[in-house]
Amino acid sequence: MEPNSKIVRFEHGDGLLLDSGVRLEPFEIAYETYGTLNQDRSNAILICHALTGDQHVADDPEDSEKSGWWSNLVGPGKALDSDKYFVICSNVLGGCMGSTGPSSINPETGKIYGLDFPVITISDMVRAQAMFIDRLGIERLFSVVGGSMGGMQVLEWAARYPERVLTAIPIATSHRHSSQNIAFHEVGRQAVMADPDWRQGRYLDEGCNPRSGLAVARMAAHITYLSDEALHQKFGRSLQDRDSLTFGFDADFQVESYLRYQGYRFVDRFDANSYLYITRAMDYFDMPKDHGGILANAFKDTKSRFCVISFTSDWLYPTRESREIVKALNAVAANVSFVEINSEKGHDAFLLDEPEMFSTVSGFLDASADALGITLEQAQGKGV
Amino acid sequence: MIVTETVEHKNRISIAHLVISEMVRENARVIDIGCGDGSLLKLLKDTKGADARGIEISPERVSLCMAQGLSVIQGDADRDLVDYPAASFDYAILSETIQAVQSPELVLRQLLRIAERAIVSFPNFGHWQVRMQLLLNGRMPVTDNMPNAWYETPNIHLCTIKDFEDLCDRVDAKVEKAVALNSKGRRLGINFPIAVQNLIGKQAVFVLRRR
């Protein structure tokens, strides 16, 4: 789906044993990088994307048309400055933007995987990323940063590879998916699977696409990314291109029209089966369960520096969940900072223009680089 | 927390910070509860090599602290200290904050639980100027280190040096050291009787440990 990205390939014998017990091989990871890796390979920052994100985190310097999903935060001169840092972002395992996922070819059958693709977990995604980071020849990451599902990967990185993660910035995330979050995901999956064009997951072979189902899934999910306040401010009860109600089921209200637009725009860029697999991975995420029921055990003896960020109006990953993470990190005397940023934009705030998040991230990174004795060279031609 | 612009008051705050930092041993693990802009933490980090942590209620100030490389958690002294394991720190510092918390007694007990020693500084409500204002004017005192009117002050639990000593008894804290500063920020001699310290001490700094 995304031929432009760089790809690393892991061949037979170099595969990954998934949490499900299945061995995935061969597999590929698609990625993008921004900025320059410095001499001592100490300025690499890995960005982990959220459910429907991809590797295109920042604007494409060669193509002004291609904007990155986190270009508010990442890019030259931004809080996460690609003039200073070597920024890496890879498409998750199970994704549909170049990394191996359910829309890839199953080497055993020569056909598209579909539901034959093994169920993956956040931990699988992170272990695949670690193999990919090895390939780049990077031993330690100056930082691992991500929001939402990206934040889950950040936590998993910090727990699994503490010696490889100097700083970790989990944003608007949780250490385990709540019952409410699983419930919303289930609604989305049921919408996809109820679409007759889903064809038991074989829609690509049969030349169709469960557009309606995936669009409805996206519409429902999109509501959870906003807040009551944000929806009210943006749309209120305003009508869409009309002066009065039509007494029908057309999109009378702007909010309806907006959701339909969001839903159908999403279908054009995302694979329905990937949506099933990645939401499943999030649902299975439960760090305490993986560590004897105690979250703090996941971070025992960690030397990483943590910066945890949440947003006041995020009801999908509410502040209390970030506080649980902070509490666990305190329990193991980890170096942790935490800030809850005032925002009315809901969960989506982490992707939007939130100056306080930007200054928090840049301040934390600068100070950490200083404390860890990491020299950050400016990119060529941009330095002083 | 007390916020004021007077130079004299600012100086006295920073003198109080110096007094506090003298009481902290090298390379100690320290938490400053209500750490504000992080100036005390920075001082402890720079002069004592302290592993300095903070709790601060305002998100803007938390970001400010983080930009200085301090590890600060946005939180509330009244609510969040219970989350820290016992004896996590060498010192828990409550600088000019105890008078603004909901439950000074519970907070003090928490300090003594999470740290080996607690260092508490506060404005002394027994200072003669305060007493005079109430006596002569019959009104709630407004001074340079308590600059707000009664209806808008964050200082809901003001106390005198004597009152604070009673609280120390009540929570089974042993007073290891107590220093009163006069209105110039100078330390009163240790030979001054407590009644005199309570009268001319504008600010007090106590070092406590569990009995």
Image: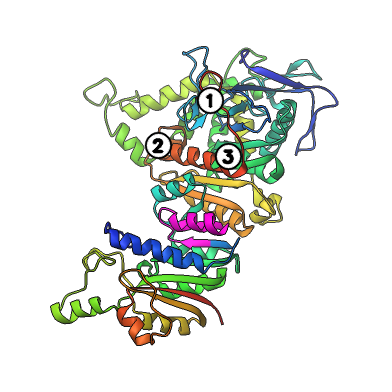
Q: Is residue A381 left or right of residue A164?
A: left
Q: Secondary structure at mark 2?
A: helix
Callout 2 amino acid: Pro
Do the CB atoms of the residues marked 3 and 2 lie less than 8 Å apart?
A: no
**Quadrant of the snapshot with the N terminus of chain A:** top right
Query: Do circles 1 and 3 both sit on a common chain?
Result: yes
In this rendering, the answer to whether A383 lies above or below A150 is: above
Q: Which residues are magenta?
A: B31-55
* Quadrant in the picture for residue A109: top right
Numbered tag placed on residue A83 in the rendering: 1
The residue carrying mark 2 is: A355
- Three-letter code for the amino acid on which mark 1 is drawn: Asp
Q: Are marks 3 and 2 on the same chain?
A: yes
What type is the residue that disc 3 sits on? Ala
Q: Which one is earlier in the sequence, the residue at label 3 or at label 2?
A: 2
The chain containing the residue under callout 1 comes to: A
Q: Residue at x 81, y 22 (%)?
A: A11
Q: Position of residue B86 (x, y in %)?
A: 60, 69
Residue hosting label 3: A369
* Nearest to the observer: residue B209 or residue B5: B5
Q: Could you say where residue B82 lies in the image, as x and y percent from the top left?
A: 52, 66
Q: Earlier in the sequence, mark 1 or mark 3?
A: 1
Q: Tell me if mark 1 has few (under 14), some (14-19) or many (20+) residues whose alpha carbon lies within 10 angstroms of its own.
A: many
Disc number for residue A4:
none
Q: Note whether residue B1 is visible.
A: no
10 Å neighbourhood of mark 2: few (<14), some, or many (≥20)?
few
| Viewer-proximal residue among A254 and A27 | A27
Question: Visible in this render: residue B184?
Answer: yes
Q: Which subunit holds the residue at mark 2? A: A
Question: Where residue B180 sits: x, y (%)?
Answer: 39, 76
| Distance from Cα at disc 1 to Cα at disc 3 | 15 Å
Pinpoint the chain carrying mark 3.
Answer: A
